[in-house]
Every structure is written in structure tokens, then in C-alpha cells.
Image (cartoon, rainbow, N blue to C red):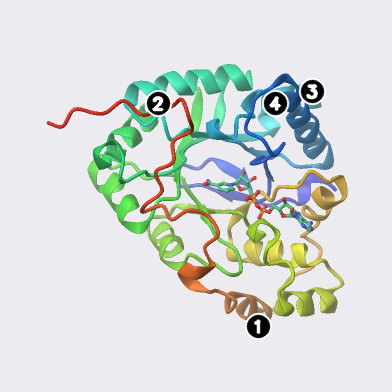
Amino acid sequence: MSTQTIPNITLNNSATIPQIGFGTLNVPPDRNPSPENTAKTAHFVSMALELGYRLIDTAQMYGNERGVGQGIADSGIPREQLFVTSKLGNGNHRPDDVRRSFDETMQKLALEYLDLFLIHWPLPTLYDGDYVSTWKAMTELLDDGRVRSVGVSNFQPNHLERIISETGITPVVNQIEVHPGFNNDAARAASARYGIAVEAWSPLGQGKVLEEAVIKDVAAKKGKTTAQVILRWHIQHGHIVFPKSMHRERMQENLALFDFDLSPDEVTAIDSLDKGESGRIGANPDTFDWIPSGEAPTPTIKP
Ligand code: NAD
């Protein structure tokens, strides 16, 4: 697989990001950063890079940043050819914790700069609902050049509206749950209105949408796998995706999306699998308030 065939998306700050990458949630399936797990993460990340992936998506809460950094180092691929994303943990929303935890992220990844740092969840029911201060602190990280772009994840239309109107700074991406089964239309449309690129997380619905009859029919017609058809659907919608797999053949298969396309009717048929809210498999960002154990947020003082 030549990396030349992976299209780039230009973000609203002119940075470019490969449209497909490698997701590392549950690589390995345990958030414990033990030396053993770190070695496993490094193994799969360097395998992904060897196969042609150039975008790697991790997060503080995945517990695998050290392994991601190790895998990058082991690959020997020049830093400037890579695009590395991490995300702020839910326990780190206070501005001081944004800065401190960003330093920790950089130390674990052992990189001089990060391409993209995201607020992982808005947590509107925590921190007195103040994700605006968190966003401001994220944008201030841009000043010393150690992060090239900042964005958000799981932001609903009203969350986007609020951070943009109160800071004047628009995120470059909104990383949200999208797959056949849950099109997440409102969040996608709001992102598009603001010129924010959509990163579709769980693009394969964590494997739950691979058996849909409509998708199987298209796959049979094209001589492709159902995973490839779904990922191609995302590509044609302009989403950035980073499917996760720990199988070499599947990792290869998930990159081989650029020698076929779906007709407009096929795209529409897959669109129509949307089940609305009931198709959501992850948490609802309006109510999600999980903080990893040992990372309780310090209560903020109300003015
Ligand atoms: P996914 O949709 O990528 O599905 C992964 C699962 O699909 C695998 O475990 C495997 O069982 C199956 N699979 C993968 N390739 C396959 C293939 N070719 N054939 C058959 N089965 C295949 O789910 P995900 O890992 O949840 O999402 C991808 C990435 O998105 C994550 O790794 C992470 O980086 C990111 N993510 C972000 C958030 C967020 O809140 N921002 C939440 C979830 C995931």
C-alpha cells in the first residue's frame, strides 16, 4: 500500500491530515499502562506504520501514549511524515491540568510536537459546565508550538456554538461517533456549518454494523469486504476515520479503499440505515460524566 494514495484533508487552519489512520482505543484491550501493554501497543503501532498508516489516534484516557510513542520511534519513519493526535483526559479539564497533562502526554509520546490535541468530552455536567475555560487553555497551548492544531471531540451543536462565540476560536476538528446505524446528523451539520472537519469515531460501529444486509449486498457486488464498503462510505462523506484492529490482514484491508467507489444510490442506501439516537453505541455527550478512577476533578469555585 503506497501512502501516496491516502488523500489529505485540509483543516480550517491550513494544516493537512490524512483521511484515514489507525485508532488505538483498546490497543491492547486494557487501559493499564504496564510494560507488557506498552510493548504490545508499540508492536501494533509500528505494524500500522509499516503498512502505510500515517495518522495515529490516541488519548490520555487510553493509557497507551507511551506505547504509541515507542511504536513511532521503532518505526523509524521521519516525524514530519506522521500525524499524531491525543486527547485531554476527563479528569484534566481545569486550565492548570490542561497544561500539566499536556506536558505528561508529550513526555509519554516522547515527541517534540503533537499534531492535534482534542478535548475528549465536553462534560457539561461537571466543572460547573465550564468547558469554555478548558477550550481557552487548549488554544493557549498553540503559543509555544508544541501542538500544531487543537480541536474537540463529542461536542454537540450547542457546545460548539458556545466555545466559538465565547473565545472566537474555532476547533479544527470535531471527533464524534458516526457509522451506518448512527449518522449523528445534527453534530455533523453543525461542524460543517463552522468549517470544522468531522472525524468519525467507531467508524465500523465497533464491528456491530458489518453484518447489515444492505452493506453485504454492496460488498458482494463490488468484490470488497463489508468493512471496506463502510469505510469507503465514510471517505465519500468526507469524514476522517481511524478504524482499530489488531490483525495485520484487517489493518491492511482497512487501508485498501482507493481503487473503487460507491455510486450515489449505494451511499444513500447506507445512509438510510441510520437509526437515530437509538443507533448510538457510545455515551451521550450531554450526560457523559465518567472520570477515570484516581482522577477526580478538583471542584471549581463558583464566582
Ligand atoms: P471501530 O469502529 O474502529 O471498530 C473496531 C472493531 O471492528 C475491532 O475491534 C474489530 O472487532 C472490528 N474490525 C476492524 N476492522 C475490521 C475488519 N476489516 N473486518 C472485520 N472486523 C473489523 O471502533 P473503535 O475502535 O471504537 O473506533 C476507532 C477509533 O476511534 C478508536 O480506536 C479511537 O482511536 C477512536 N475513538 C474515539 C472516541 C472518542 O470519544 N473520541 C470513542 C471511541 C473511539
Give the CA separation, mark 4 to mark 1: 42 Å
Mark toward the start of the polypeptide (4 vs 2): 4
Is disc 4 in contact with disc 1, using a CB cutoff of under 8 Å?
Answer: no
Under mark 4, the amino acid is: Gly
Provide the secondary structure element on which disc 1 rests: helix
At mark 2, the secondary structure is helix
Q: What type is the residue that disc 2 sits on?
A: Val
- Pick whichever, 50 or 214, lies toward us: 214
* Mark closer to the observer (4, 3): 4
Q: CA distance from mark 1 to mark 3?
A: 44 Å
The residue that appears at 70% across and 59% down in the rendered structure is 207
Residue at left offset 60%, top offset 53%: 240
- Quadrant of image for the C terminus: top left
Query: Residue 92: x, y in percent?
Result: 41, 28
Left-right relation of 15 to 254: left
Provide the residue designation for mark 2: 98
Instruction: Determine whether label 1 and label 2 are within 8 Å by CB.
Output: no
- Residue 67 is marked as 4
Distance from Cα at disc 1 to Cα at disc 2: 45 Å
Which residue appears farthest toward the left when viewing the image? 303
**Which amino acid, mark 1?**
Asp
In this rendering, is residue 146 above or below 22? Answer: above
Q: Would you place residue 98 above or below residue 124 in this image? A: above
Spatial distance from mark 4 to mark 2, Cα to Cα? 21 Å
Q: Amino acid at mark 3?
A: Asp
Q: Position of residue 292 (x, y in %)?
A: 48, 33
Given contact means CB atoms under 8 Å apart, are the residues at marks 3 and 2 in contact?
no
Q: Which of these two is toward me, 41 or 132?
A: 41
